[in-house]
Amino acid sequence: MYKFVAIDLDGTMLNSYGIVTENTKEVIKKVIEKGIDVIIASGRPIDSIKTIAKEIGSNKYFIAGNGALVYDIQNEEIIYEKYISKEKALEIIKICEENSISYNLYTETTIIAKALKYNVLYYHKENLKKEENKRTKITIIDDIYNYVKNLEEPRFLKITICDSNKFVFQSIIKKLRKVNNIEVLDVSHMSRKVIKQGTEDIPIEYYYTEISQKDVDKWNAITFLAQKMNVKEEEIMAIGDNINDKNMIKNAKLGITMEGSSPDIIEIADIVTR
């Protein structure tokens, strides 16, 4: 009997337009009614996940920033956290600036970016369909380095690096791997999302990686939460599609992915569904 279902958002629970379909909501409702906890495990910041958790009726906990924190919904507090330090963030920003590559920083409450490009453009378009209090906050800053330098107590969940050119992207990855005490997500395929422009579907395609503090992982956050909730590892199911879901798919008693997911995830999943 499974008691804990950890589920990713983008590319998993959400469709290509960033929406939880009515069918998905109905299935999740039935699962929760059976006494099974459905826990969102996402790379998104807190406020972006909060609205979706409420939408699906998940009211206990969720995991944000790819495992950088665990949030207690009922008490509205963070109960587990592993942030990127300001010094480390500045080191990464400097590398990105010197190589003219797109990047953004995720805090607990906002995404800091220089422009509406790649994943930030997708979140912006998603926001246009939502009420203001349900939107993912995006902060556009021209000089991110000095902005971060002047922050008193920044809490960075992760840093995302994006580029549409594979050669440029791979070049920056090599440089980032030389930075100590961080995790650089090993993504080798393009992210493909769809946005609406009037009546047209416009694809957004780019290579990306996500950087977090060392030992930050969705599975580590799941095991912390499972212990808190008195759930055994053999009672955990995990559903995801991308490389940041790898350890939870691999280590959960039942790991599920979808057709079209990262090949690395399809290879290790117990079940591949539609």
Image (cartoon, rainbow, N blue to C red):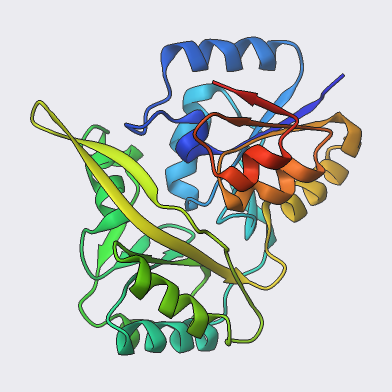
Image quadrant occupied by the C terminus: top right
Q: Is residue 108 above or below residue 95?
A: above
Q: Where is residue 23 in the image (x, y as percent from the top left)?
A: 47, 11
Q: Residue at x 68, y 15 (%)?
A: 31
* Left or right: 146, with 267 as reference point: left
Residue nearest the observer in this picture, 154 or 171: 171
Q: Which residue is drawn at 52% across and 33% down?
A: 12
Q: Is residue 46 above or below residue 81?
A: above
The furthest residue to the left: 198
Q: In this view, does 148 lie above or below 165?
A: below
* Left or right: 171, with 54 as reference point: left
Q: Which residue is drawn at 68% across and 17% down?
A: 32
Image quadrant occupied by the N terminus: top right
Q: Where is residue 17 in the image (x, y as percent from the top left)?
A: 32, 31
Residue 189 can be seen, yes or no: yes
Q: In this view, does 140 lie above or below 180?
A: above
* Left or right: 265, with 194 as reference point: right
Residue nearest the observer in this picture, 268 or 58: 268
Number of dots carrying numbers: 0
Residue 230 can be seen, yes or no: no
